[in-house]
Image (tube, rainbow, N blue to C red):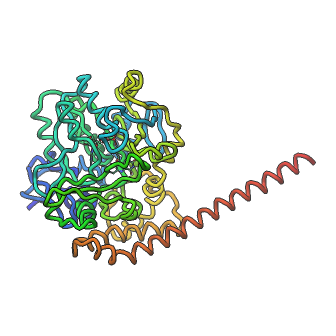
Amino acid sequence: MNIPKVINLVVKNDLCVGCGICVYKCPSNALEMAWDKNGFLFPKVISSCDSEGDCLEVCPFNSIPKDEVKTENEIAQLFLETENHHQKIGKYKQIYAGFSTEFRLSSSSGGLGTYISTKLLENKIVDHIFSIKESSEPGIFYQYSVSSSKSDLLRASKTRYFPVTLATVFSEINQLEGKIAIVGVGCFIKAIRLAQHSEPKLKEKIPFLIGIICGGLKSSFFTEYLASKMAVEIKNIRKPQFRKKDFSSTANDYSFSCSDENEEEKSIKMKTVGDMWGTGLFKANACDFCEDVTTELADISLGDAWLDPFDKDGKGTNVIVTRSLLAENLIKEGIKNKDLEVDFLPLEIFLSSQQGSFNHRHKGLPARIKLAKKKNQLVPPKRYENETVGWDFKLVQKQRMKVRAESLAVWQHKKEASVFDETIQKSLKKLNFYTKIYHKRRRFSQLKNKVIVKINNRIFSKNKNQ
Ligand SMILES: Cc1cc2nc3c(=O)[nH]c(=O)nc-3n(C[C@H](O)[C@H](O)[C@H](O)COP(=O)(O)OP(=O)(O)OC[C@H]3O[C@@H](n4cnc5c(N)ncnc54)[C@H](O)[C@@H]3O)c2cc1C
């Protein structure tokens, strides 16, 4: 039996994010999506393949891409006409922060995701939007689904930290009349751009992509773990909500909630659960090899403005990066009509809002690549591959990778939050210890540099006065 290339080069390397575009692209219909033992979606071989690797061509984690689509930089040249470019955030037109007056309270952040989707429909730029809505299949809480009206779109608001796939979306798109917009995280948007590159008619069919800035994709274990923290049995989890706001608190003080078998809603403040993002718990391995912090290939990128003074407001505020003229016009029009309370955000401040993600995904990446290569694992070409990483940050990276893998193995073994917390504690403590060393050393070298600059300045002014 011929095995599709994406299986041997991506899935077997644990680099799949489950976007599923390979399933759509496979001319032999040799693939379908399935759940793996770690709670992620992945393409499974269902029949022999006789093609030349069409599946691999559209994979965002292809380790042997063609030169013209080698990294986000090259792909951006093909799709974004924008003049500004920043090494860390890619091509962009403007950067803003703010919220939608209509959708802020019913959204996860400032409501720009729902606002832009609504305007795309109202202004007839597109006829349908694919984003994430509740699924009717048991245990599969969320999935990509089409919306063609504003009321439909309201059901697609809010952040869902749950595995989703585009596997059947593209066949649906080809059946639909009119134009389409899609909402997605960085790697999904990259896969869509690769599909548009290999099939140019998709470029016209999908004229707008809404990018969701992403700090890493979580396995379905994440939902199970949070429910278990509230003593809700996995089989009884209903309607999980990942970002319940507390309007009277800060923006990052949100809760997870779900209903149990009696439809009784339970909720837990995420602050009491511990650090779920900086530790890599329940995260996909591929996310450790993604360097696209700000969803560089979308027309507009939206994230959380968790920075002073916006984080003081529990109602939520977005950071916004426009990358196409269409996106820029939608924001300008919204400001003019007072639908948006949005203002320019200086580049440096925007960068600081995503500092943690830049540290992990740009600064720490070369260390993780080295570790992967040592194990003969394939890695896609990366822009930050050759930077130097200090020994202390290397230790942090190694331990984070360990914690990530361990979290999935431990949950697989026993799906109970108290057992999980006890088992993973030792590894988390070690990670915490290494992180402290790294921070201390960094503070020390910053101080040392300041002293050196001061001494040099003194010597310089002394010499000048002589
Ligand atoms: C997995 C994940 C990780 C994230 N990590 C970060 C981060 O590290 N830093 C940061 O600044 N922001 C992050 N975000 C983005 C943030 O949570 C908000 O989604 C974003 O600010 C938009 O908020 P909003 O109020 O404008 O969106 P809303 O108006 O609530 O609309 C949200 C839109 O996103 C869609 N959506 C929800 N879940 C998903 C999903 N899993 N995949 C694709 N589309 C989805 C919805 O269908 C809707 O169209 C993350 C989001 C996700 C899904």
Residue 215 at what x, y percent from top left?
A: 37, 53
Residue 33 at what x, y percent from top left?
A: 14, 55
455 and 276: which is toward the camera:
276
- Is 383 placed above or below 427 here? above
Location of residue 379 (image quadrant)? bottom left
Query: How many numbered marks have been drawn onto this rendered protein structure?
Result: 0
Q: Residue at x 45, y 35 (%)?
A: 96
> Which residue extends farthest left?
47
- Is 316 placed above or below 420 here? above
Position of 102 compared to 87: left or right? Answer: left
Position of 146 compared to 410: left or right? Answer: left
Tell me the quarter of the image containing the N terminus.
bottom left
Residue 60 at what x, y percent from top left?
A: 29, 50
179 and 417: which is toward the camera:
417
Q: Residue at x 79, y 51 (%)?
A: 457
Q: Residue at x 52, y 45 (%)?
A: 308
Question: Is residue 311 visible to us here?
Answer: yes
